[in-house]
Image: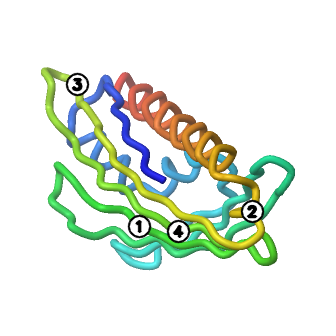
């Protein structure tokens, strides 16, 4: 499954870049995130609880940041295991562009699931993934814009 999108954030690119690398901001923006910890500047561990249709699962995951070109882009990839519910893995290329005093954040993401959640059907998984991605980027936009307005 592929997801693409764009957010216009009312903050300069360096503020948006800092937020993309701030575990506290990421934690508050990731739907269902219960914990997010930096193991190194490029490695994080996370626990996320999600509900896809009738299946609720808690995923324990590892996240890796790569292809880092500060402050313009990076690739974020990860894999989470949800016990009997299955697994999810994927990644996103995130690109930041200056636009006056604002920043345009573009993303292209790919994801795949396996196990019990994969049996729910592609349409349900795609719509849930799209909704979760939109929630994350909308929350991220609001958090960064509010921080920039301080």
Which element type, helix, strand or loop, lies under badge 3? strand
> Whole-Å distance between the Cαs marked 3 and 4?
31 Å
Residue where numbered disc 1 is placed: 77
- When asked about the image quadrant of residue 56, the answer is bottom right
Task: Give the mark nearer the N terminus: 1 vs 4.
Answer: 1
> Whole-Å distance between the Cαs marked 3 and 2?
42 Å
- The residue depicted at 46 percent of the width and 78 percent of the height is 39
Which element type, helix, strand or loop, lies under badge 2? helix
Residue where numbered disc 3 is placed: 102
Which numbered mark, 2 or 4, is in the foreground of this view?
2
User: Which quarter of the image is occupied by the C terminus?
Assistant: top left
> Whole-Å distance between the Cαs marked 1 and 4?
8 Å
Q: In this view of the protein, which residue sits in the foreground, 98 or 145?
A: 98
Mark 3 crowdedness (10 Å alpha carbons): few <14, some 14-19, many ≥20? some
Q: In this view of the protein, which residue sits in the foreground, 33 or 3?
A: 3
> Whole-Å distance between the Cαs marked 1 and 2?
23 Å
**Residue 58 left/right relative to 67:** right
Q: In this view of the protein, which residue sits in the foreground, 121 or 137?
A: 121
In the image, residue 147 lies at what x, y percent? 41, 32
Task: Give the mark nearer the N terminus: 3 vs 2.
Answer: 3
Residue where numbered disc 2 is placed: 119
Which element type, helix, strand or loop, lies under badge 4? strand
Mark 2 crowdedness (10 Å alpha carbons): few <14, some 14-19, many ≥20? few
- The residue depicted at 70 percent of the width and 53 percent of the height is 121
Q: Give yes or no for contact between labels 1 and 4 (Cβ–Cβ under 8 Å).
A: yes
Which numbered mark, 3 or 4, is in the foreground of this view?
4
Task: Give the mark nearer the N terminus: 1 vs 2.
Answer: 1
Residue where numbered disc 4 is placed: 89
Q: Give yes or no for contact between labels 3 and 1 (Cβ–Cβ under 8 Å).
A: no
């Amino acid at each position: 499954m592929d997801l693409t999108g764009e957010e216009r954030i009312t903050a300069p690119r360096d503020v948006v870049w800092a937020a993309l690398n701030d575990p506290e901001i990421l934690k508050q923006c990731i739907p269902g995130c219960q914990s997010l910890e930096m193991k190194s500047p490029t490695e994080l561990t996370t626990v996320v609880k999600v509900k896809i249709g009738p299946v609720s699962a808690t995923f324990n995951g590892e996240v890796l940041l790569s292809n880092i070109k500060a402050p313009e882009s990076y690739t974020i990839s990860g894999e989470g295991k949800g016990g009997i519910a299955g697994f999810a893995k994927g990644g996103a290329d995130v690109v930041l562009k200056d636009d006056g005093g604002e920043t345009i954040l573009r993303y292209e993401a790919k994801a795949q699931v396996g196990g019990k959640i994969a049996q729910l059907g592609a349409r349900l998984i795609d719509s849930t993934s799209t909704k979760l991605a939109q929630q994350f980027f909308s929350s991220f936009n609001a958090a960064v814009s509010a921080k920039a307005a301080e």
